[in-house]
Image: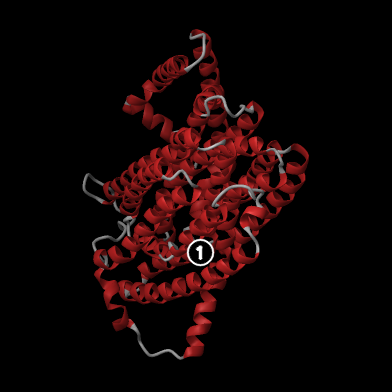
Amino acid sequence: MTDTQIDAPGKAGGPSGPGAGRARRLVRGWSANLVQLVLGLTQQLLLIPAFLHVWTGDMLAAWLAIYAAGSLVVVADAGLQLRAINRFFAFKSCADCDGRTASFYARMLRIYVAVVVVLGILLLAVTHVLRPSALLGFRGTASFDSAFIVMTLGMLLCLPGNLASGLYRARGQYGRTVWLLNVVLLLGQIAQLFAIAWFGSLLAVAIAFISMQLLFAAFMLVDAPRLFPFLRRAGAYRARPRSWSSTLRWNIGQFGRAFPFAIANITELALVNLPVLLVSALVTDRVAVAQWGLTRVIASLVRGLCLQLAVPLAAELGHDHAVGDRARLSRLYAQGSVFVTVLASLIVAGLLPFWGDFFTLWTHGSIPYDAGLAVTLLLGSAAAAPSLLALAFASHSNRGDLLIRTKGLQLVVFLVLSFVLTSWLGPLGAALAVVASDILVQFGLLALVIMGQTLQHPLRHTGFLVLVSVVIVLSGWGAGVVAALLVPGAGLVHFLAECAIWLIFAAVAASPLIIKSVRETLIAAIPR
């Protein structure tokens, strides 16, 4: 093994022991993800006023649709990244870990290249026959089709970088890949501002965004062999030459084994991005489409935060599962699920009372605020938070059968409810479809099964999570209402003042956590 391997389980972690190494990796991963969250807020919140300064509401709706379509292209990965991560974990128990990893990496990279070539040709052919602007209701929007092709084709070309990112994750280098991505996101946002200021077109902004993503993917593919020198010796690990037919069977087999992970990824991406496209296609009011897209931004960011918190935990949990350390696994999962739930609930508690004021300032009052839509999405995000750690852990512990059953069912439930409810209730129907599929399937089935297999008292743990979430959300919401009453008025000063008062309330409520004995008592109270 190289010096990047995961710490061996079962040893007491002193200041320089395995426990310290795990904590250090988690802190690095979370700190990188925190910066990524800030950049995500900048991309989807702070850039919107700049776009609205140049574009109309219709142009903004077009950009949101293109951005969502580019995000959906990630489904072309077909679960291969998570398949590779699980294999990288499995190789840790082999005698020749580095050799088998290098050989598998080289063969998977060839599969990625083939996928990009084939799907790229199909994408160009389909968009030539079926104009995206006609399908999504943007016939009169200049350069929509070309921007759509640039975004989707560019995201497709970024796919091979997923393989290198997966190896980083399995070898304890999760923080490194996220920090690299953070740099790219920052450069991309600067490029977008220049593009809209100088050119003002959808195409220019799409090129500015995707060029930085391509730079990141290319750098990852070059950086991986430098960081892991054994990748350059992949050819030396081939035991015997393989025939064309055996190679073809092996390649097809990887898609079959990756299929459950593909279903999980497709469902997650569909829940985040497909509602934007469905509302664009089913709702004729373009202002309502922009309103839906902007409201979905904050719910998507809450969901994204939970996943960013969960993925570093899942990498550690995947190691414990692979080596059979059930005690360490159970302890980390119980504490991790509470951590994700508390932070998600705290953020939702802060957003619920103030999102309306922020929305008005954010859009300069040009797009009306829908309180029912925002409350539905935010409460749904808080309810779904614990299940996202279960999803991430299932994807890092090779639970393909469970993933394909639960996430496949969730996708069906979501699609059926989306078409029925969106046609009936508009954007609110799409929100209800997302929340219902999360609570009924992802939490009600997937999370409960994972907790049942991981914890000794899963029902007690579930009840504890629900209680913690309800207390935090209601307390924070109430504190926000009080803060708004203490500072009457409207505008930016009013918004900043009520947020400052709420933060003071939150700091006072959380101050007992400074005491070590209080923290240890609360951690000990978590049912496992």
Q: Amino acid at mark 1?
A: Asp
81, 153: nearer the viewer: 153
Residue 362 at least partly seen: yes
Residue beneath the point at 51% across and 84% down: 248
Residue beneath the point at 60% across and 32% down: 379
Query: Residue 287: where, in percent of width, then height?
Result: 64, 35
Residue beneath the point at 30% across and 56% down: 7
Question: Disc 1 designates what residue?
Answer: 77
What colour scheme was applied to this rendering of the protein? secondary structure
Q: How many marks?
A: 1
Label 1, secondary structure: give it: helix
Residue 327 at least partly seen: no
Residue 49 left/right relative to 407? left
454, 385: nearer the viewer: 385
Query: Residue 226: where, in percent of width, then height?
Result: 24, 66
Number of other residues with Cα within 10 Å of mark 1, as a class: few under 14, some 14 to 19, many 20 or more: many
Q: Which quarter of the figure has residue 58?
A: top right
Query: Residue 371: where, in percent of width, then height?
Result: 63, 26
Residue 377 left/right relative to 12? right
Residue 124 left/right relative to 498? right
Residue beneath the point at 49% across and 87% down: 246
Indicate the quadrant containing the N terminus: top left, top right, bottom left or bottom right: bottom left
Q: Which quarter of the figure has residue 234?
A: bottom left
Query: Residue 21: where, in percent of width, then height?
Result: 27, 50
Q: Please tell me whether residue 60 is drawn above or below residue 358 in the rendered image.
A: below
486, 397: nearer the viewer: 486
